Image (cartoon, coloured by chain):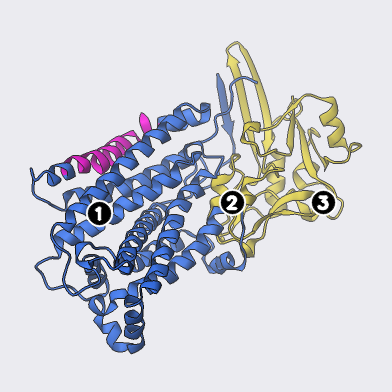
Chain colours: A yellow, B blue
Amino acid sequence: MARFGMVIDTRKCVGCMDCVVACQTENDVPHGHCRDWIVTETRGEFPSLSMEIRSERCNHCDNPPCVSCCPTGASHVEPFGKTVQVTANRCIGCKACISACPYGARFVHPEGYTDKCTFCLHRVKEGKDPACVSVCPTRCMHFGDLDDPKSEVSRLIASRKWHVLLPEAGTKPRIYYLD
Amino acid sequence: MLEITTTRHNPFVDPQLAVWGWEIPVYLFFGGMIAGMMILAGAAMLRIARGEDPESFFSVQTPLLGFVLMNVGMGALFLDLAHKLYVWAVYLTFEPLSPMSWGSWVLLAVYGVLMLSALLRIEDSWPWLARTFPGVRRLSESLASSPGKLRALAWSNIVLGVALGIYTGILLSSMVARPLWNSAILGPLFLVSGLSAAAAMVHIAVRVLPGRPAPQGLVGGAFAALWQPLGARPPRPGAADALVKADLGFLFAELVLLGLLLIGLLTAGASQQAAATLITTGPYALAFWGAIVGAGILVPIVLQVAELGHRIPHTVVPALLVLAGGFALRWVLVNAGQASQLVQSAAR
């Protein structure tokens, strides 16, 4: 069984926000809400500065706190690709998962249920990449099976230095950022 | 230096988490108070079942007001839900890792036990109900006259009261993303705070009601029941001193637990230390030190010690302050907790 994840090369990302627009168009994300977004992180003191641009979204964690806190099972790990998904008609809108997520990846959809990135599972089932990956003009985003050592994502993780977001939270996020 | 800019702009998530508004502190406050009332009532029922004189103490009937307040708390909880029409989904499953799922089922059991316990003196509190439904009166008499049934009801109240009082704290402390809540102290803290709020509520009834005709309306009858033990006459005046002593114990315990909470946060990692500053020196410091520690705990302790020493007359002031402090505790912890977040290291 596949375990989907994403690898994003921060050296190639220019923060153009194509991924953000593609997601909003593909998933009909309600106006004023974001399933993915761009973060610019600047470190150091002038003139010795370094900058990293990242495309962020739900990390589809291996140890997702949003799933364990959900009182109805609406927030669950989907067997296909072991991704974290929300069943809208089981969600009561208690917002516990939003409080539990250290990445701020979830929001309340105007219809009342909790919404977030799905890794475009509907596209992946058709053999396509998630919308954000497919439109990236610098090809900095890669999607695939982390459990398959021959997949592109596994080879990138094995051959390059990387980091994940807030590893100290113990959530084991599955989006890897190449340094 | 670490500077982060983001294009994310989700309502109630950015610039800082604020998904839980006034409804959750209101629910937590009433839930805690009801938990305290159930434990007090359970203790009183056990004494009655042992054959002790019911005139010497009180609070056996707190579940009636608890039942009324439970509806207020649950109403607030329902208002907080964003997908209200799907609330039934909570009772289609049991999620063992979710404190909220445990709480939902505990609340269902609490409702049942509160309703049954409220029947003990229903004829005095809500005579109109006993008149309309004679079966209710028969059930009430059957419960009150059987030590075995009383004991079972007492332990149900105590066990469920402890579960209800603790689960709300565990619910918050299980969220790794909010460092202010990352402490197992929250469970016992909310339980003790609920006990002091329950004792304060009984204390108010003790001060307000004697010498007046007992109200028998929906809320008034429930409130009056706080001061009506099993027996024809109200408790002896000296019984109030025991209540004040118990409340002093709860307040001291609350003070110790708050101290342990701060010590735990300030000696933990960078995220917990930053979270602690929100309530010690940050935007919630005035409410924390002024409303919770000062007006909600220290001042009532001083006033109640003076009352016990007969240096000042008994008044409802300490009880009102305890109630306000109990609500402030939930309000500050819910809001400051949402404002706290994991600190990203500046070095990598």
Can residue B274 be seen in this snapshot? no
Residue B99 x %, y %: 54, 53
Residue range highlighted in magenta:
B278-303
Q: Which residue is mark 2?
A: A69
Q: Nearer the viewer, mark 3 or mark 1?
A: 1
Residue B277 x %, y %: 41, 29
> Which chain hosts label 2?
A
Q: Residues within 10 Å of mark 2 (few under 14, many from 20)?
A: many
For the residue marked with disc 1, what is the amino acid? Ala
Q: Residues within 10 Å of mark 3 (few under 14, many from 20)?
A: some
Dominant SS type (magenta): helix
Q: Is residue B24 above or below residue B49?
A: above
Residue B302 is inside the magenta segment: yes
Label pair 3/1, CB-CB below 8 angstroms: no
> Which chain hosts label 1?
B
Which element type, helix, strand or loop, lies under badge 3? helix
Q: Which residue is mark 1?
A: B200
Q: Residue at x 81, y 34 (%)?
A: A139
Do pointers 3 and 1 mark residues of a single chain? no
Question: Residues under labels 2 and 3: Cα distance?
Answer: 27 Å
Residue B288 x %, y %: 33, 37
Q: Residue at x 23, y 48 (%)?
A: B245
Q: Is residue A171 above or below residue B198?
A: above
Decide if residue B70 is on the left or right side of residue B1: left
In the image shown, does B54 or A42 lie closer to the viewer? B54
Which element type, helix, strand or loop, lies under badge 1? helix
Decide if residue B195 is on the left or right side of residue A110: left
For the residue marked with disc 3, what is the amino acid? Val
